[in-house]
Each structure stands twice: as C-alpha cells, then as structure tokens.
Image: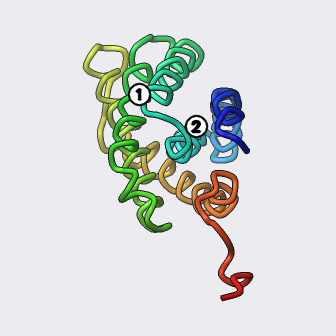
Amino acid sequence: MSRFTFQFFTPLLLFFMMLLDGQLTTVFQNLSGGTLTPVCHLLLIFLVYSVTQHRHSYVVIVALFLGVVYDSYYVGILGIATLLLPLIALFVYNIQSAVFTNRWTRLFTLIIIVTLFEVASAIITSAFGFSKLNFLDFVVHQLAPTLLLNVVLAIILQYPLELFYKLRKSHPRYNLK
C-alpha cells in the first residue's frame, strides 16, 4: 500500500477501531456479569503501529481528532482522550526506533501505553470531580482485566499488523539466501 493510501486509510481504520472498542468493551463487560470492566483498546494498538507510516505532525492531528470524537462519544467530557491520544502518538513516535526492534518491546510498550491511558483517565476524571477513585477497586475491577484483554489482543494481532504495516520484509522460511 502506498504512503498516500495509508494517509487516507489510517483515520478511517482508527475510527473504525474506536467504534469496535466500544462494542467489544460492552460484550466483555456483559460476559463478566458486570463485576469487571475490561476496556478494549484496539485504537491504541493500531495507533502504535500507524506511527511507522506517517510523519509525527500527521499522526498527532489524527490522534487529536480521534481524541475529540472519543471524548464526545464515550466520556462525555472533552479533554481527556483529546490530550492523551496525541501525547501517546508523540511518545511512540519519539521512541519508535526502540519499540519496533522486536515483538517483545512492542508488547511491553502497549502494556505501558494502555496502563498510562487508563490510569491517567481515572486520575483526571477523579481530579475534576467527575468520579470517585478507589484505587484498589480500579486496579482489580478495571485495570487488571483491561491489561489482560489488551495483551491477548496485541499478541493475536501482532503478526497480521506486522504484515499490514510492512514491519517484516520477508518470512525467514521463504528467505532463499
């Protein structure tokens, strides 16, 4: 896929992932009987990989736009994802030479990003009085299930995303040296 095609396709793909996140989150919450709140973050997973295809200014603008949409659709308070998504995009962009060296660093980077997103969101909503934060309940009922869900999704999607974003030039089995 050409760079121009990625420029057009990335915002649509990330927007679709954001919508799919909401649906999958609802499904997993219903499966847990409402006791756990695993939050699906396909948007963050795909955003990390999208950094490899674009300049930082483009990724920040797309993340800013998606943050506004995310906040207005899911949170109801503008500012949380609007701030966090561009910061995450800039963070990954600045450390991408280390992140994309192997699969383990990508996986650990995604764990860090999902944790930071969840914790920062909880702290911001609590600081402004939109929710009460009981940290132990938050960790047990939301953060731990969210991390587990997103690690499983990241592992499942890692190889297809490597192929899609051309992070693997060729498969070692087919390398005819």
Q: How is the image coloured?
A: rainbow
Q: Nearer the viewer, mark 2 or mark 1?
A: 1
Q: Residue at x 58, y 43 (%)?
A: 46
Question: In the drawing, does residue 78 fall left or right of residue 19?
Answer: left
Query: In the structure shown, which secondary structural element does the residue marked by tag 1 occupy?
Result: helix
Q: Residue at x 49, y 30 (%)?
A: 59
Q: Give the residue number, with chain letter if any, for mark 2.
A: 43
Three-letter code for the amino acid on which mark 1 is drawn: Pro
Three-letter code for the amino acid on which mark 2 is drawn: Leu
Residue 80 image-quadrant placement: top left
Q: Is residue 102 above or below residue 45?
A: below
Please provide percent x and percent y for residue 140: 41, 49
Please tell me which residue lies in front, 77 or 14.
Answer: 14
Badge 1: few (under 14), some or many (20 or more) residues near its Cα, within 10 Å? many
Please provide percent x and percent y for residue 137: 37, 42
Question: In the drawing, does residue 122 fall left or right of residue 103?
Answer: left
Please provide percent x and percent y for residue 113: 40, 45
Q: Give the residue number, with chain letter if any, for mark 1.
A: 86
Q: Is residue 162 above or below residue 42?
A: below
